[in-house]
Amino acid sequence: MNCYWILLVLCCLLWSGHGENPSWFQNISTSLFKSPGDVLLGGLFPINQLTSNLSEQLEPGDIHCNRINPYGLALALVMKYTVDEINAIPELLPGITVGFENYDCCNQPGVVIQPTLRFITAGTSQEVEVKCNYTEYTTRVIAVIGPCSSELATITGKLLGFFLMPQVSYSATSEDLSDKLQYPSFLRTTPSDRWQALAIVQLLQGFGWNWVAVVGSDDEYGKQGNQQLSALASSGNICVAYEGLIPVYGDPRPTIVDILDHVEETKVGVVVVFASYQVTTAFFKEVIRRNLTAVWVATTGWALYSDLLLLPGMKSVGTILAFSDITQPIGLLSSYIHELFSRMEEERLRQDRPQPDPNTSPLDNPCPGCWDLSPENSSMMNTVLVQRTAFSVYTAIYSVAYALHHTLGCNETYCARHPRRDKVYPWQLLEKLQNISLTLNGTQIEFNDKGNPDIGYDVLVWVFGNHTVTFKDIGTFNQNITINKQLIKWHTANSTVPTSTCSSDCQAGQVRIVKGFHSCCFDCIDCQEGTFQNNTDDIQCTTCPDGQWSTMRSTRCVLPTYTYLSWGSYEAVVLVLAGALILCCQTWVGVLLFRHRATPLVRAMGGPLTALCLGSLACGCCSFLLFLGEPSDMVCNFQLPLNAFFPTVALSTILAISLQIVCVTEFPERAPALLDTLRGPGSWTVVLACCGLQAGLIGWFVQQGPSLTEFVASLQVNFVTHFLCCPVQPVLNFALMLGFNGLLALLSFMCTFMAVKPVRQYNLARDVTISGLAYCVTWVIFIPIYAGLSDKNKSIGQVIVTFLSNVVLLGGYYLPKCYLVLKHPELNTDDYFRTYLEGAPPIPPEEK
């Protein structure tokens, strides 16, 4: 069935396109506001403008509308055209003619009541009957088209709703009218204010504007629009910095001045004006006077009105983005109006029609001045406002006509019911109208359960010329907005998109701390370590879950990563080179002493003990390799123990030699008898005893301490990157191992630092004293430094102090002897080492 109606309308348009004008133009009546018919439609249009001062009204009828409103008159003529077109389509309502009665509503509640009462009079009478049941009550008209505003629709809607008379408005947008309990018979062919508010919010979001002012007119349209917009803006993270209403009936200027003061004070760059065109005109006069520039978002209430376009200086206010109902052109409308006005001029010139009496009631002639219309006046139909609104009127009337088609049971040639013989009630038409579905000029028309159409908006931008204003389509809205931003020429320098925010956007890893009363005004706070920014609009940082961590200003937490002294790092390379150098020195010393192993010097040093000491120093130097590369449980079981054990071997051998020196210097009488024992089994006993004791301490350390795997598992993750080193736990056991080595060095020092220097013989006690003291000093200096280092530097420091302790022992104990071997080989004799080889008492110094 729907396809049939589409085909029917297309055929009508094709038929009307043949020739200069279609044939039904020959039957055009010059009666502008009334036309008889089998079924009457009522129309409410703002044909005139208010000319009286409402504040001086003393009587109910003391309201005068004596100045023609070209826009309202044009819409009334669109209704006349549409009815004539419908009557010219025989297949739509075969055998039935549609008539109409149009009245002026003057955009005033006090004016709209009279024609509304006439619509509900009984039949053709002038009386409204009082009945207990109005089910079979026949009214003058079967449906009403209009009125033009939400404020008037709320007045007429309840009255007509009582009779369930269909009322189809072409421009009333208040969301309150969607309430079917209060307005059961109200429908409209323009979207509601909530739909428009949603479109505006999406527009603001699309450009990143979240700091705006909202200005409305103090009427039903403005108040409801502001309310809807503020509610949707809040849920869309848009802050309304200021909201004001401009009075409609009083002097608006004081209020406008106060509103603009607040707009400037809040420093908003975008102002949404949800107001009727009358107050908007006064509003922009003050804007122009102040030379204020901004982005102005225009609602359908004023977006296309010519009064605003003609304001001097309007091009200086900034950028105006506007919403207009999606529309379709009505092809024959201009030709129809031209033909109509031509006929009127001919009749006027022939005086076939008498000039209207200016005192005639507006109900009988809503526009006395229209008697003078001529073809030149047809240009009123070509304004952008009329062209974009005409389709809403056209659609409203066609919707009623199609609903009549179904109500009367019509087909292409016949209607089962006829209004002349069968009573047709408005409530019967309402049921069909609410379920109507048709396509007009390619636009699908149907009403939802709230009486609203599924029609969106065109998004326009005002383009200012030298003396003209045009409108450029930049996008559309139907549930979702689509805008081609490249088509907009902004009022800013270089046509950059203006900004309107209370605070700059926070950077990644920052959260908003709201200041003041608006959520859009905030300070940006960095997320600290261990917290992160979860969402862009967070007001506090989120704590990382267990086992994860974050750095400063993070947007996520991560599992920790572990680093170590890799073989390719520059620290490792330096340590390897240093270790190789020390090892080369130790090898050179070992080779040198081995070549002179039978000399008195080497025998006095301890013979095999010297080789053991030098070997342990070399092994201790090589043990630093355990600190390089990725550690493991096995590596950690040997790293610190070996690092402590090899110095014990070296220091215990030096201690054994220092005991020999004590025996020779402190007990000279018994030295020859004891020296053989101390050099043989006694020295090895000392070395083994010291090494055994250190081995016990090392075993205790390994047994008490955690493995590397256990240590890592027990770490409290408060890092993103952590240097992985072997655990130094328990610290007490670790200190005992190092302390034991220090004790051996200290004992060696104490055994020799007071020893008497043999005259004209080698002073072996001096070498032991220096090496023991240097070893102790090295570790005493290292311990406080070690405590304050990072994990990575602790590992490096431990290797360095191992190298230094090796160097001081090598330099303090071995190098003086190497010097003697190389530079003074003549001193490498039994006599020069007699005290230490034979246990002979030192020769006392000679008296001067």
Image (cartoon, rainbow, N blue to C red):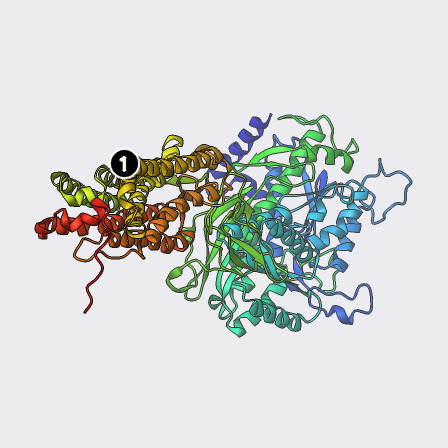
Name the spot of residue 733 as percent of width and height, x first: 46, 41
**Height in image: 411 above or below 682?**
above
Name the spot of residue 478 as percent of width and height, x first: 55, 42
Residue pointed to by mark 1: 680
**Height in image: 677 above or below 108?**
above
User: Which three-letter amino acid code belongs to the residue tagged 1?
Assistant: Gly
Q: Residue at x 39, y 40 (%)?
A: 725
Which of the 4 image quadrants contains residue 380?
A: bottom right
Residue placed most toward the observer, 335 or 529: 529
Q: Is residue 606 left or right of residue 498?
A: left
Give the quarter of the figure containing the N terminus. Answer: top right
Residue placed most toward the observer, 726 or 772: 772
Query: How many labels, in total?
Result: 1
Residue placed most toward the observer, 462 or 385: 462
Q: Residue at x 74, y 43 (%)?
A: 179
Q: Is residue 146 left or right of residue 515?
A: right
Q: Residue furthest front?
A: 669
Q: Decide: few, some or many residues near mark 1? Use Cα within 10 Å; few <14, some 14-19, many ≥20.
A: few
**Height in image: 6 above or below 585?**
above
Q: Residue at x 78, y 55 (%)?
A: 114
Residue 338 in view in this figure: no
Give the quarter of the figure containing the C terminus. Answer: bottom left
Q: Is residue 334 left or right of residue 675?
A: right
Name the spot of residue 786 as percent of width and height, x first: 39, 51
